[in-house]
Image: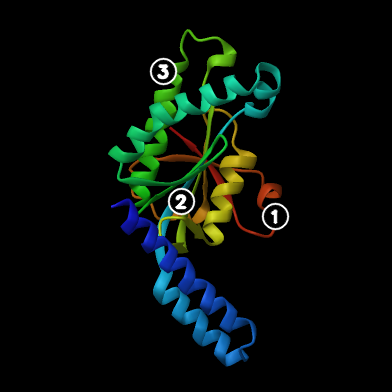
Amino acid sequence: MLCKRAAFVSASEERLEKLIIRRISATDKGKKEIDTQIWDLFGEKLAIMFTDLSGFSRNTAKFGIIHFLQTIYESERILTPLIESHNGILIKTEGDSMLVIFKNPNNALECAISMQNTVRKYNRGRTAEEQVLLCIGLGYGDVLKIGDSDIFGYEVNLASKLGEDTAKAYEILASENFINNIVRKRIRTEALDEKIFSGIGKGFRIIY
């Protein structure tokens, strides 16, 4: 299975690289044709989740690399089962961040709420340095998914900005397109300061 997976990802990346190389020297018409082919091969409509741990760099500097590894381990241990139970796929981890995709944005929202409720319960009675303080950003839209190794797209960038740069501990922030595509009843939201998304859209805080 591992060999098959590696071959699949490699084949996807190789195919994309060949198309990008062709695109470099193509005419405007040729570029459009190649773009259509790339979207046909790799395009999907997905919900994207980026997670981050609040105050992580500060605590790492204060408590050291072993504390860093322990916090990452604990966060993945308690959060990964929730991703799986809500039909999400963990694409990759980078330091204290996780990139997760969902076919259904409603599953992504329910997962995010479950994650925050779970870490809040986990943190009860723990010292500040032992707590997992989770930040979550959500997006939804057309993306290029390259095998199981990476995804690219406008909503990917928004979810990353929300989860890794903007959200505070226990917050769930979402793009406007994500909010417009969920069907959860009685969801409450607050618009974020427009300066955060100046020129690129709107963002919302989900009240859960």
Kindly state the secondary structure of the residue where label 3 is placed: helix
**Direction from residue 29 to residue 89 in the image, left or right:** left
User: Could you say whether the residue bearing mark 1 is in a helix, strand or loop?
Assistant: loop
Kind of residue sitting beneath label 2: Ile
Task: Mark 1 or mark 3: name the one nearer the start of the chain.
Answer: 3
Label 2 Cα neighbours within 10 Å, binned few <14 / some 14-19 / many ≥20: many
Three-letter amino acid code of the residue under disc 1: Ser
Q: Which mark is residue 48?
A: 2
Q: Position of residue 128 (x, y in %)?
A: 58, 13
Tally of numbered tags: 3
| Nearer to the camera, 74 or 135 | 74
Q: Position of residue 164 (x, y in %)?
A: 60, 41
Q: Indicate the secondary structure of the residue bearing disc 2.
A: strand
Q: CA distance from mark 2 to mark 1?
A: 21 Å
**Image coloring type:** rainbow
Residue hosting label 1: 198
Label 3 or label 2, whichever comes before in sequence order:
2
Residue drawn at point x = 57 percent, y = 83 percent: 22
Disc 3: which residue: 121
Residue drawn at (65%, 24%) of the image: 60
Q: Is residue 123 above or below residue 50?
A: above
